[in-house]
């Protein structure tokens, strides 16, 4: 369960990873960083339509401060989820009625990944893009069920530190 949103992880991350790739996910746990990254990248290359694998990979890079790589993976994940949800590939063009963003599936994963991109942007010091992403999240998720308020708080904190 995601502690910030109270939602089951599979609901946010687009389901379960393919069972045949579980050995790669397991290999990524508790191994040296280079090996873990290689295992996750291999899994994504084998199953490029598997949304949970993208989540694991962008989370892996973000947790290690590899924000450029996390950003790259999250953007790829956003594109895959957009295709699967049949929404516009340009996140700026997506509107609330384009998909059901609150039920399990690619649209919800897309929304969660948009939040991840906003978080990564804040950490990279890209306030303008982070704000734009948060505004899109606010437009689509008016009740903040995905938890973008956390990113808003980080934005506010980074502004007050200037």
Image (cartoon, grey):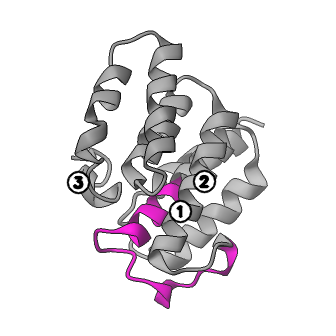
Tell me where residue 23 sits by quadrant. top left
- What's the residue at 26%, 51% (across, down)? 16
> Which mark, residue 76?
2
Question: Left or right: 79 with respect to 86?
Answer: right
In this rendering, is residue 117 above or below 26?
below
- Residue range corresponding to the magenta coloring: 92-115
Q: Name the residue under label 3.
A: 6
For the residues labelled 1 and 2, the Cα–Cα distance comes to 6 Å
* In this rendering, the label closer to the viewer, 1 or 3: 1
Magenta stretch containing residue 100, yes or no?
yes
Q: In this view, does 90 lie to the left or right of 97?
A: right
Residue 112 image offset from top left, x and y in percent: 45, 58
Q: In which quarter of the image is the C terminus?
A: top right
Looking at the image, the residue that sits furthest to the bottom is 97
Is mark 1 in CB contact (under 8 Å) with mark 2? yes
Looking at the image, is 1 positioned above or below residue 21?
below
Task: Count how many numbered circles sit on residues in the image.
Answer: 3
| Quadrant of res 70 | top right
In the picture shown, does residue 117 fall above or below 89?
above
| Element carrying mark 1 | helix
Q: In the rendered view, would you say 59 is above or below 84?
A: above
Dot 2 or dot 3: first in sequence order is 3
Q: What residue would you read off at disc 1?
A: 80
Residue 155: mark: none
Is 41 situated left or right of 162 in this image? left
């Amino acid at each position: 369960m995601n502690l910030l949103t109270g939602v089951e992880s599979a609901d946010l991350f687009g389901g379960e990873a393919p069972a045949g790739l579980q050995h790669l996910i397991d290999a990524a746990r508790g191994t040296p960083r280079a090996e873990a990254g290689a295992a996750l990248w291999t899994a994504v290359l084998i199953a490029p339509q598997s949304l949970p694998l993208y989540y694991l990979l962008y989370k892996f890079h973000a947790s290690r401060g590899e924000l450029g790589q996390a950003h790259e993976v999250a953007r790829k994940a956003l594109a895959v989820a957009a295709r699967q949800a049949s929404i516009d590939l340009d996140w700026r063009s997506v509107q609330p009625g384009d998909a059901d963003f609150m039920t399990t599936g690619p649209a919800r994963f897309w929304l969660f990944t948009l939040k991840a991109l906003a978080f990564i942007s804040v950490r990279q010091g890209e306030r303008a893009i982070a704000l734009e992403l948060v505004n899109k999240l606010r437009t689509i998720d008016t009740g903040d069920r995905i938890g973008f308020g956390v990113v808003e708080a980080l934005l506010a904190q980074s502004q007050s530190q200037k």
